[in-house]
Image: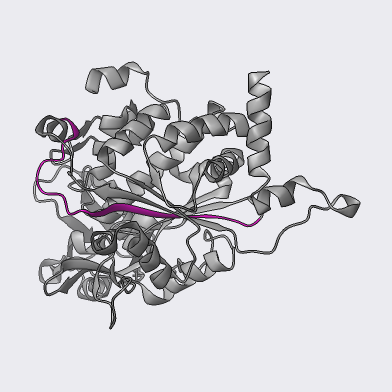
């Protein structure tokens, strides 16, 4: 009886949500009426602050040093009007933007890293700045800090992460081996904060955060934690102990959001990072920042405003004729043909022309790429520029790729490397999350 009463109370509260009421009431002829609108936008931020932490807590959380009192994580979640799609867009902390004007001030607002808006005007200015630079209205705001994140992950049953190589970052305390791991809140915090990995910086970190969130949502769905309003209410109550909300966001809002996310299949949940044009834009007094790609970022926000999917939108992520999976600028190549060497340089490979010592009679067959063992991904990038070339692995101490041109004509294609593709392209959760079963629960105890 108590569960029935609780369920009726939750449903009564949820009826106040226009979109839930609209979905619940079929119109004449069996069609479902929809309220006009543009969906719902939720801004989720994690704060980098050591305020109130004891020395022991700082050691346990691996957060020594001075905090910036700014947003360390920023995600904008868009729920479509029909509640059949969710789009999660990460906004890198070093994005260089113009802040919204703080309340009670006059004149032009300053520019800076987007994470600094919180330090100036706390959550309200962070929200207004996101609204200013995206053109979207933020309907709900959720905020947590280090301890809140740790507690939230523990309360929600932990986080599953996977990696194809060992990950170690002394700054964040992350230290996990190759494979799939189920992490408690403390280790999940280290995973979410790690920046000193390969690739370094914010975009790789943001993609790992997205992958962890995708797997957490999958885990909550599998366990039924969001299966109905009553279970979603229980999950929301636990979450409210770890996060702070704005005055527009209450228990019923969290239940509705959770219930919506819990009913979405993985291929209807999208993740992306704002497209970047400059990854090291230096600003006096600010430091190294990220500049958004003007046209592609604008296309991203326009798609969300129009309530359209962001995956498959070539305005957000153009499809090059020949895509490089790794950066040619990190691949050193010796080429024994001058024309081929010049053509490869156009794609930014680091080329040494050895044509002066090439044999007078070329070996029969196509060109051969001899690459250092363990550099298969880079070999695939070079092979994309030289279609038809044969690949040959060899143990080489100098880490240089050799291209030996044969008797057959060589076609050189211009390859395009886009770091946004590698670390932030729009993708659905089924392609992002870990595959296979999570590691046993004992993994947490062994490494926690």
Quadrant of the snapshot with the N terminus: top right
Side of 117 where 372 appears, left or right: left
- Which residue is nearer to you in this view: 278 or 306? 306
**Residue 197 x %, y %:** 20, 46
Residue stretch rendered in magenta on the structure: 60-81
- Which residue is nearer to you in this view: 340 or 373? 373
Side of 190 where 163 appears, left or right: right
Q: Is residue 407 above or below residue 219?
A: below
Quadrant of the snapshot with the C terminus: top left
The quarter of the picture where residue 123 lies is bottom left
**Residue 109 x %, y %:** 28, 77
**Residue 74 x %, y %:** 35, 54
Residue 374 seen: yes
The quarter of the picture where residue 437 lies is top left
Residue at the limit of the structure toward the bottom, as seen here: 107
**Residue 429 x %, y %:** 49, 45
- Which residue is nearer to you in this view: 85 or 26? 26
Residue at the limit of the structure toward the right, as seen here: 29
Residue 391 seen: no
């Amino acid at each position: 009886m108590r569960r029935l009463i609780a369920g009726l109370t939750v449903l009564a509260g949820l009826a106040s949500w226009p979109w839930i009421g609209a979905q619940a009431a079929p119109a004449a002829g069996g069609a479902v009426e929809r309220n006009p609108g543009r969906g719902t936008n939720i801004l989720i931020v994690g704060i980098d602050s050591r305020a109130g932490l004891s020395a022991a807590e700082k050691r346990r959380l691996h957060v020594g040093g001075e905090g910036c009192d700014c947003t360390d994580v920023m995600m904008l979640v868009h729920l479509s009007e029909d509640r059949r799609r969710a789009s999660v867009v990460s906004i890198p902390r070093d994005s260089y933007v113009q802040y919204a004007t703080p309340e009670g001030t006059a004149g032009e607002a300053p520019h800076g890293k987007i994470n600094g808006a919180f330090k100036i005007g706390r959550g309200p200015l962070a929200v207004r700045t996101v609204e200013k630079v995206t053109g979207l209205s933020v309907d709900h705001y959720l905020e947590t800090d280090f301890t809140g994140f740790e507690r939230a992950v523990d309360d929600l049953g932990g986080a599953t992460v996977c990696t194809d190589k060992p990950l170690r970052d002394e700054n964040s305390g992350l230290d996990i081996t190759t494979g799939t791991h189920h992490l408690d809140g403390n280790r999940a915090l280290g995973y979410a904060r790690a920046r000193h990995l390969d690739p370094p910086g914010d975009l790789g970190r943001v993609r790992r955060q997205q992958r962890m969130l995708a797997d957490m949502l999958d885990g909550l769905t599998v366990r039924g934690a969001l299966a109905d309003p009553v279970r979603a209410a229980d999950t929301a109550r636990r979450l409210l102990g770890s996060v702070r909300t704005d005055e527009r966001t209450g228990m019923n809002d969290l239940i509705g959001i959770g219930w919506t996310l819990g009913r979405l299949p993985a291929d209807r949940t999208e993740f992306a990072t704002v497209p970047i044009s400059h990854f090291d834009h230096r600003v006096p007094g600010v430091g190294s920042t990220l500049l958004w790609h003007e046209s592609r970022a604008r296309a991203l926000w326009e798609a969300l405003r129009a309530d359209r999917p962001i995956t498959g939108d070539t305005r957000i992520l153009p499809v090059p004729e020949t895509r490089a999976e790794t950066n040619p600028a990190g691949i050193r190549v010796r080429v024994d043909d001058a024309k081929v060497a010049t053509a490869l340089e156009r794609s930014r490979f680091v080329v040494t022309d050895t044509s002066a010592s090439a044999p007078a009679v070329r070996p029969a067959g196509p060109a051969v790429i001899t690459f250092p063992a363990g550099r298969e991904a880079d070999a695939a990038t070079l092979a994309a520029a030289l279609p038809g070339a044969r690949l040959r692995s060899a143990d080489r101490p100098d880490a240089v790729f050799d291209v030996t041109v044969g008797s057959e004509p060589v076609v050189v294609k211009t390859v395009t490397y886009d770091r946004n593709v590698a670390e932030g392209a729009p993708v659905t959760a089924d392609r992002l999350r870990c595959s296979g079963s999570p590691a046993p629960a004992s993994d947490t105890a062994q490494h926690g």
